[in-house]
């Protein structure tokens, strides 16, 4: 009861604090104006009288709003006390209030949310780009032939756990002598993390081993790499490639280091910057990365919003200060203007990654290739709360590319009708405005970054999606490893994994049919429910027709094994690479057969094709957007 009362009081304060964060600018303005309204013997003009009346109204409005916030917080406290005292079953007050907070915040937009201590820690790792641990992560994954999922290694980082012999797929048996079978994923990973310099003893069982083995790992500051791969893709023509997977505080430094290495023997003729799958991150990091390619003083991005929030809980709110700022390149570029740049993007390129691709496109510094980006033009700020470890992530502004376009592709409104959260609406074509790049190319707002050259990736078939969802490729790799563990480790040391053969693929097909029958009949559960409904409604004579449909759908799905053989084999190869190869090798292997990358290289190495999009400074170009469909 004491703990519940404490949680309730804390929740009430947290709600009041969160509400005041949203209304703080108005209240702060009112209090600030109120200090100005001291008595004066000087005569006042009509304009001054009007200003005083307006300020007084704002003050009253601010005080009234503050009072209403306090009332709402008190109401939540009363509700929680009643639930705690009278609900039929014991309740988790912390969980209940977090649900209330997120229901409130998610009614604004999907990105505004409350974060408890655990979520806050994950956010700090994400934006900080480092954590204290051993460089490995585990997750609960089902295992063929067992009832319950087991803790398996899903990430073993090069330079850390990977170098100590830990491999993806290894089953975690013990941590410091304690069995982990009953631990959940979060608790197990928390035990692996810890103070740098301390050690942890783990026991692992690998498919193909007869007995588990012990490993002693020393915890250290683990830096999460944001550049998984940098290489020359055409040494003769000096074409470089850099992949960037996120935007943490280290991203610009990593990209700069990669560029300096690639330019050791002189300037590159062309550079491919791969931002596909990059979900974004820190706005400042995006500005720093863009700065590597554009001249000093070049505008990179602008933000426009309502108010700047204080960075520390309890600090005064900045009164009515517009979050209206333009960020410029502060240094000379690392890549010379003579280097042709192609930026690769897709539907998972978002936020900070769109800032970079949008800035380079607007300044005609790069040609953007691939698929339309996600379209997230909102800026969030982390606001720490008074309760230790808690914070809210609050949308405070929209960002605009140098041409003036906001690439936010959706609007959000409260769901209504008794539902929680928001309903998203895609921006209509009428809402999209036209802008021009420095060279006169047409670009549009409100729809993400549209590539200059559209290269669509081939969509995954239903069978492939279903097998990925069921972790079938991961589990097949475990079965393969049972009989090839030594062979796999030898190939790992050589940095060369055997390619998946047709014989191996045939074995995979048999493996799926034996262990994942629903992958062959993904519609079976729905069709079985249809048969039950027909039976209840008195139409059981139609059930044989449903059986015919089930058989036909299973036949069509099974045909995908032949139709999509190449795609499925690539997934098998990736599953083996994940087990035995360090990160850079795995990433390089994943690019084999990449049609978007091939198109980017062809464009970058062709002066005529490239300059059809981007003319030299001072020349104007208005070229149509090209589109290439994937081959069937």
Image: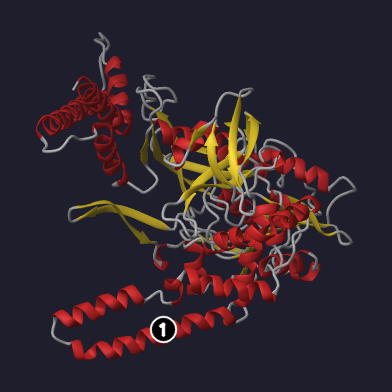
Residue furthest front as drawn = 210
Lateral position of residue 557 relative to residue 361, left or right:
left
Nearest the camera: 599 or 195?
195
Lateral position of residue 337 relative to residue 485, left or right:
right
Q: How is the image coloured?
A: secondary structure
* 615 up-or-down from 554: above or below: above
Residue furthest top as drawn = 41
Residue 449, image x, y percentages: 55, 59
Viewer can see residue 287? yes
Q: Quadrant of the N terminus?
A: top left
Q: Quadrant of the C terminus?
A: bottom right
Q: Secondary structure at mark 1?
A: helix
Nearest the camera: 165 or 63?
165
The residue drawn where x is 53% and y is 57% is 348
Total number of numbered discs in the rendering: 1
Nearest the camera: 112 or 409?
112
Residue 554, image x, y percentages: 43, 82
Lateral position of residue 231 relative to residue 470, left or right:
right
Residue 455 quadrant: bottom right
* 505 up-or-down from 351: above or below: below
Crowdedness of circle 1 by 10 Å Cα count: few (<14), some, many (20+)? some
Viewer can see residue 402? no
Nearest the camera: 283 or 480?
480
Residue 416, image x, y percentages: 21, 54
Residue 512, image x, y percentages: 52, 71
Q: Which residue is mark 1?
A: 553
* 445 up-or-down from 260: above or below: below
């Amino acid at each position: 009861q004491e703990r519940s009362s404490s949680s309730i009081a804390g929740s009430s304060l947290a709600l009041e604090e969160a509400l005041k964060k949203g209304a703080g600018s108005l209240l702060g303005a009112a209090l600030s104006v109120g200090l100005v309204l001291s008595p004066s013997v000087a005569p006042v003009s009509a304009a001054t009288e009007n200003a005083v009346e307006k300020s007084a109204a704002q003050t009253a409005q601010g005080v009234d709003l503050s009072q209403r916030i306090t009332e709402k917080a008190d109401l939540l406290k009363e509700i929680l006390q009643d639930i705690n005292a009278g609900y039929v079953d014991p309740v988790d007050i912390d969980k209940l209030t977090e649900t209330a907070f997120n229901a409130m915040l998610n009614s604004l937009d999907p990105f505004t949310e409350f974060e408890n201590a655990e979520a806050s820690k994950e956010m700090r790792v994400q934006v900080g780009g480092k954590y204290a641990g051993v460089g490995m992560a585990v997750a609960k994954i089902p295992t063929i032939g067992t009832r319950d999922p087991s803790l398996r290694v899903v990430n073993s980082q090069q330079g850390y756990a990977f170098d100590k012999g830990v491999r993806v797929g290894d089953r975690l048996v013990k941590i410091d002598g304690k069995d982990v079978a009953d631990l959940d994923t979060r608790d197990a990973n928390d035990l692996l993390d810890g103070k740098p310099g301390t050690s942890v003893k783990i026991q692992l069982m690998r498919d193909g081993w007869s007995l588990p083995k012990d490993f002693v790992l020393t915890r250290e500051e683990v830096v999460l790499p944001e550049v998984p791969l940098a290489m020359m893709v055409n040494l003769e023509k000096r074409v470089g490639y850099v992949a960037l997977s996120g935007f943490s505080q280290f991203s610009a430094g990593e990209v700069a280091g990669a560029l300096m290495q690639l330019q050791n023997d002189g300037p590159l003729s062309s550079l491919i910057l791969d931002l596909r799958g990059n979900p974004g991150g820190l706005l400042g990091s995006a500005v720093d990365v863009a700065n590597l390619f554009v001249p000093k003083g070049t505008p990179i991005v602008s933000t426009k919003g309502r108010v700047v929030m204080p960075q520390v809980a309890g600090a005064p709110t900045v009164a009515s200060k517009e979050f209206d700022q333009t960020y410029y390149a502060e240094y000379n570029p690392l890549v010379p203007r003579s280097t042709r740049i192609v930026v690769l993007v897709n539907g998972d390129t978002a936020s900070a990654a769109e800032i970079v691709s949008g800035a380079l496109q607007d300044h005609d510094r790069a040609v953007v290739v691939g698929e339309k980006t996600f379209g997230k033009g909102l800026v969030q700020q982390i606001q720490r709360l008074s309760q230790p470890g808690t914070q809210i992530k609050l949308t405070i502004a929209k960002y605009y590319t140098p041409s003036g376009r906001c690439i936010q592709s959706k609007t959000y409104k409260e769901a209504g009708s008794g539902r929680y959260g928001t309903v998203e609406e895609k921006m209509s074509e009428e809402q999209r405005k036209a802008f021009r790049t420095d060279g006169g190319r047409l670009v549009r707002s409100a729809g993400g970054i549209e590539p200059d050259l559209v290269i669509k990736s081939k969509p995954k078939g239903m069978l492939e999606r279903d097998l990925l969802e069921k972790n079938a490729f991961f589990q097949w790799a475990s079965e393969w490893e049972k009989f090839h563990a030594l062979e796999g480790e030898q190939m790992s040391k050589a940095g060369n994994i055997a390619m998946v053969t047709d014989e191996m693929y045939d074995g995979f097909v048999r493996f799926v049919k034996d262990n994942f029958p629903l992958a062959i009949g993904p519609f079976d559960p729905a069709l079985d429910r249809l048969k039950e409904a027909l039976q209840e409604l008195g139409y059981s004579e139609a059930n044989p027709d449903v059986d015919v449909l089930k058989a036909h759908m299973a036949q069509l799905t099974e045909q995908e094994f032949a139709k999509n053989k190449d795609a499925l084999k690539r997934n098998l190869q990736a599953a083996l690479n994940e087990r035995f190869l360090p990160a850079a090798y795995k990433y390089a292997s994943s690019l084999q057969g990449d049609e978007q990358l091939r198109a980017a290289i062809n464009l970058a190495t062709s002066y005529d094709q490239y300059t059809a999009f981007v003319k030299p400074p001072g020349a104007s170009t208005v070229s149509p957007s090209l589109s290439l469909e994937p081959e069937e």
